[in-house]
Amino acid sequence: MKKILSCVMALSIAACTVLSASAATAITSGGDSSGTATVSTNRAPAYTVTIPDNKVIQSAELSGNVVLGNVEASDVVIGDTDNLTVTIKSANSFAMKCDDGKGDHSISYKVETETNSGTDLTDGATVLTVKGGSSSGTETLTIKDINTGSAACAGNYLDTLTFTVAVGPAGA
């Protein structure tokens, strides 16, 4: 059994050697005295983006600003001329809708970033940009101007914020 296993191993090694030799460039006497081999790889973009967790706004907080949380990008590996962008979209145009199903009761609100304080985000707005060559970035989001004017019913008011991550050429 050991002899059979040894023969199989020897044939495997010989086959690998033959395969390796057949793929190599031969340099022979009387011809070129040098040859080249290219070594390459392709590293795909990589990153980790963390978005805020679900946020429950307490009744006492309805009259002020509420920190929604951070959007963070870490371990970013992208092309030098690329940007990683995170955008935001609200399911209800930045309004929490009452889930009672008996009317169109809503609580509108606005969201701003710490970097652009005073500028309200709209659907599709960029929340965070990380430029090629940078390995991380963070932006804090704040909910403000909560308007309970049309909240005529008691109940749960909900909105869903969707964050989308994209990598592409800067300025595109």
Image (cartoon, rainbow, N blue to C red):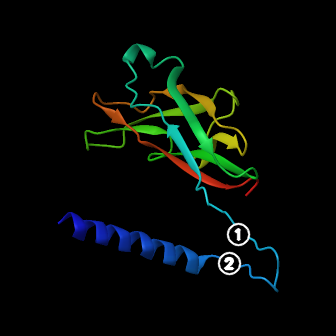
Quick one: label 2 or label 1, which is nearer the N terminus? 2
**10 or 45, nearer to the observer:** 10
Question: Where is residue 66 shown, x and y percent of the image?
Answer: 51, 21
Q: 118 or 46, which is in the foreground?
A: 46
Give the CA distance from mark 2 to mark 1. 8 Å
Snapshot quadrant of residue 42 = bottom right
- Residue 154's x, y, as percent? 28, 27
- The residue that label 1 is drawn on is 37
Q: Name the residue at 40% across, 39% down.
A: 159
Q: Which residue bears the numbered disc 2? A: 25
Q: Amino acid at mark 1?
A: Ala
Residue 155 occupies quadrant: top left
Q: Residue at horizontal 55%, vertical 33%?
A: 71
In this picture, is 25 found above or below 90? below
Please tell me whether mark 2 sits on a helix, a strand or a loop: loop
Q: Residues within 10 Å of mark 1 (few under 14, many from 20)?
A: few
Q: Position of residue 96 (x, y in %)?
A: 41, 36
Question: The C terminus lies in which quarter of the figure?
Answer: bottom right
Q: Residue 126, which numbered label?
A: none
Front residue of 49 and 122: 49
Instruction: Judge depth for marks 2 and 1 and give the one in front.
Output: 2
Residue 49 point in image, percent of width and height: 52, 39
Q: Secondary structure at mark 1?
A: loop
Q: In this rendering, is residue 142 above or below 49?
A: above
Tag 2: Cα neighbours inside 10 Å, few (<14), some, or many (≥20)?
A: few
Instruction: Return the residue found at the far front.
Output: 3
Q: Amino acid at mark 2?
A: Thr
